[in-house]
Image: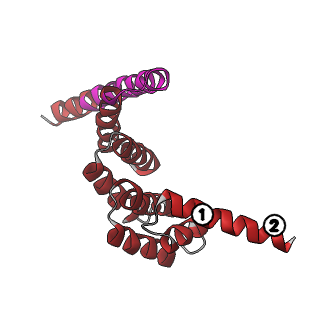
Amino acid sequence: MQKLWIYLSILLMVACSGSTARTEEEIARLETQLAKEPSEEILNQLLDLYKEMAAKTSGEQHMDYLWKAGETARAARDFSTAETIFMELYSQDDSPDLAAKALFLHAFMCDEDLKEYEKAKSLYEQFLQKFPESDFSDDAQFLLDNLGKSDEEMLELLNKANAENTDEQ
């Protein structure tokens, strides 16, 4: 009986590794196709495959597929899925750089895509508190300071700052 369990375990591992390889090949094919001819259908297929691979993998590979799934969900405008994935990424301590990117992108998504300014404000503040040394800290502070401003208002501010810098030189 014990030999049967060992045989079945080995058979299951071999079947899963073959399935993973086929899924990776399908992901590569869809990524190439998406680059040539972007479509919502391809985005959704990729999202499903990234989530599938995240569930089948662990460690860094799991985190990478989860990140790709989050970015793809946002691109597909599936914001609830993107939010769930980003929250999972930044709640883990395994990869601080990826956690910082996920928290920043979650805040940015709430700001730019969803226009949920109070939520974005809270997330930007959380980001600045948790990741003050991140490469995105200056960007987060700028976005927080200018939360809710229109593109025209932002352009006016940038032009004004540029003019002030030119006057100082």
Q: Magenta stretch?
A: 12-40
Position in image of residue 58 (x %, y %):
38, 48
Residue position marked by numbered label 1 in the rendering: 156
Amino acid marked by disc 2 = Thr
On screen, residue 14 above or below 155: above
Q: Which mark is residue 132?
A: none
Circle 2 Cα neighbour tier, 10 Å, few/some/many (<14 / 14–19 / ≥20): few
Q: Quadrant of residue 132?
A: bottom right
Q: Is residue 11 magenta?
A: no
Which residue is labeled 2 in the image?
A: 166
Of 161 and 123, nearer the camera is 161
Q: Which residue corresponds to the image point at 42% horizontal and 43% vertical from the top-left?
A: 68
Question: How far is the residue under mark 2 from the one under mark 1?
Answer: 15 Å
Residue 21 % position (x, y): 39, 26
- For residue 138, side relative to residue 110 (left or right): right
- Number of residues whose C-alpha sits closer than 10 Å to that of mark 1, classed few (under 14), some (14–19) or many (20 or more): few
Decide if residue 24 is in sight here.
yes
